Image: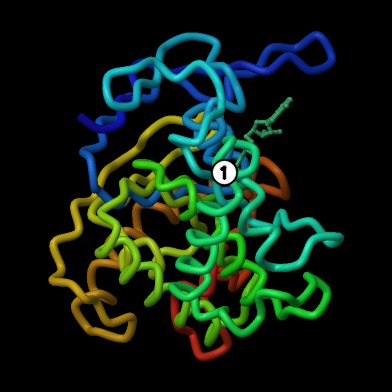
Amino acid sequence: MGLEIKEVSKKFITKNKETYTLDNINLSIKKGEFICLLGPSGCGKSTLLNIIAGLLKPSSGTVSLSGQVVKEVGPDKAMMFQESALFPWLNVIDNVEFGMKMAGIPKEERRIKAIKYLKMVHLSKFEKSYVHELSGGMKQRVSLARALTLDSELLLMDEPFSALDSQTKSILQLELQKIWWETKKTIVFVTHNVEEAVLLGDRVIVMSANPGRIKREFKIQLARPREAQSVDLAYVAREVMNELKEEVEKVAKSEYDNDWSIEKSNILYDSNNNMGSGL
Ligand SMILES: Nc1ncnc2c1ncn2[C@@H]1O[C@H](COP(=O)(O)OP(=O)(O)OP(=O)(O)O)[C@@H](O)[C@H]1O
Ligand SMILES: [Mg+2]
């Protein structure tokens, strides 16, 4: 049994006005599946992830993990955030152990696991370093190690690589694919980057905004391990991009002005006119 999201809606009340951020989200995720959530800024991706994690309550609907309704946060749902959420006063290994400490795992077991996962993310040599001594990519690897130590069935990742340079990002994408393959976790991964979604996901869920809904689902049937540069991947990414483009344009027009367009703004393309540099 995996993760079941049933008729989940979420409304926020600001300045006496109710807005539906999520509207009737239904998603059934199999154990061990890798799901990527893609959508324009503000469509409710983080809100949905926070509801799955038990950090937020839905206004209606339910989320169940392995048949149990999610009511609160817990070590069965590890979360990795966009910005590294590490403690500057703790060294690397103590940061990695922190989640396990909260979960009440005994000291010796914590150390053994922390060493194992630091090795998995290639940071064994840095266990005594402090956060300010690490690069952005290293910090995200520490966060990943910390999330993995909980041995949770579910790993939730909210744009974990979006602040990284493209080389570091590629390395971490490769490592994550390998770790997912080895650990058989269920992963829900939020991203703005179409190529990243197609590279990693078994399915890519494209969301629309205002209110946040599931617009379309793509089953990615490319063989693994996948190559970011492959022609087949670029072909699928273009198809996904066409779906997403409409939504991004809709949101941008409501936030900027009516004659705004993706082509004029260049946000989906890099200087070489390659797609997927992130929205
Ligand atoms: N605690 C809150 N109170 C009021 N409104 C909120 C709250 N949290 C989120 N929102 C609103 O819900 C909407 C969705 O926010 P959310 O952070 O889930 O979007 P997102 O898809 O993750 O965006 P991004 O891609 O920029 O991270 C936004 O309009 C936001 O202002
Ligand atoms: Mg977000």
SS at mark 1? Answer: loop
- Compared across the picture, whether 56 is left or right of 121 comes to right
**Ligand 2 within 8 A of label 1's CB?**
no
Horizontal side of 275 relative to 239 (left or right) equals right
Q: Position of residue 17 (x, y in %)?
A: 75, 12
For badge 1, the amino acid type reads: Pro
Q: Relative to 248, is 102 above or below?
A: above
Quadrant the N terminus occupies: top left
56 relative position to 275: left or right: right
Residue at 34% across, 17% down: 68
Displayed quadrant of residue 265 = bottom right
Other-residue count near label 1 (Cα within 10 Å), few / some / many at <14 / 14–19 / ≥20: few
- Quadrant field for ligand 1: top right
Judge whether residue 144 can be spotted in this image. no
How was this image coloured? rainbow
Residue tagged 1: 106
Vertical position of residue 177 compared to residue 261: above or below: below
Q: Nearer the viewer, residue 94 or 258?
A: 94
Question: How far across and how far down the image is residue 258, in percent?
Answer: 65, 48
Observer able to see residue 222: yes
Residue 180, quarter of picture: bottom left
At 31% from the left and 71% from the top, the residue drawn is: 178
**Residue at coordinates 67% horizontally, 70% vertically from top-left?**
139
